[in-house]
Image (tube, rainbow, N blue to C red):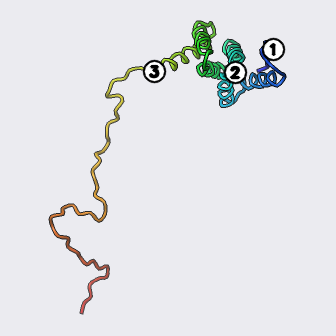
Amino acid sequence: MKLGKRKPTGREKDEASIELLEKLREQLYSPNLNVVRQTAYQLSWLQEDGLELLKEALFSNATRRTKNAATYGLRKMRGRMTKPALLLIKAGTESTNSATSQACRNAIDILFNRRPKSPRRHPSQNQRPNRFEIKDIPARGQRKNTDQPRVRRLVSHDPPRRS
């Protein structure tokens, strides 16, 4: 995805921080899911700048992968940015973009430990019928009946001799 030039907000202290934010912004739109997720987590530590970049990714025409990673970064926001991040996720649920609203709904479900709704099945459908009965087989060297003394038999593989 071709990204336009980012406008500095004035909060950046030096040129290095501007370059870092540009690099993280490009990585957020990467095709590699691991890179996108790690970048979203790194942005969650950058307070206002991270919130701004994650908001941009969430409400842009980005891929579903980028939107899910953006909601992941918003969920991981700490400190004073947790409340604005939560408000941003809630605002995303009312978005007209279906990918954005679905990603935000999933993020809210994860935040509040809700399980996704799965279709209910009849209990007999969950259990597979056994095709055969499993029986216990004693290990080698163990006797079945310990009350009787063990009788040793000499087994010869040679045919009997005739005299």
Q: What residue type is labelled 3?
A: Arg
The structure residue drawn at horizontal position 65% and vertical position 25%, both measured from the top left corner, is 41
Residue 3 percent across, percent down from the top left:
79, 18
Kindly check if marks 1 and 3 are in contact, taking CB atoms under 8 A apart as contact. Answer: no
Residue position marked by numbered label 2 in the rendering: 46
Residue position marked by numbered label 1 in the rendering: 8
Give how far apart the Cα atoms at labels 2 and 1 are.
14 Å
In this view, the residue in front, 161 or 25, is 25
In this view, the residue in front, 162 or 44, is 44
Furthest residue to the left?
147
> In the rendered image, which quarter is residue 130 located in?
top left
Residue 119 percent across, percent down from the top left:
42, 20
Residue position marked by numbered label 3 in the rendering: 115
In this view, the residue in front, 71 or 130, is 71
69 left or right of 3 in image: left
Callout 2: few (<14), some (14-19), or many (20+) C-alpha neighbours within 10 Å?
A: some
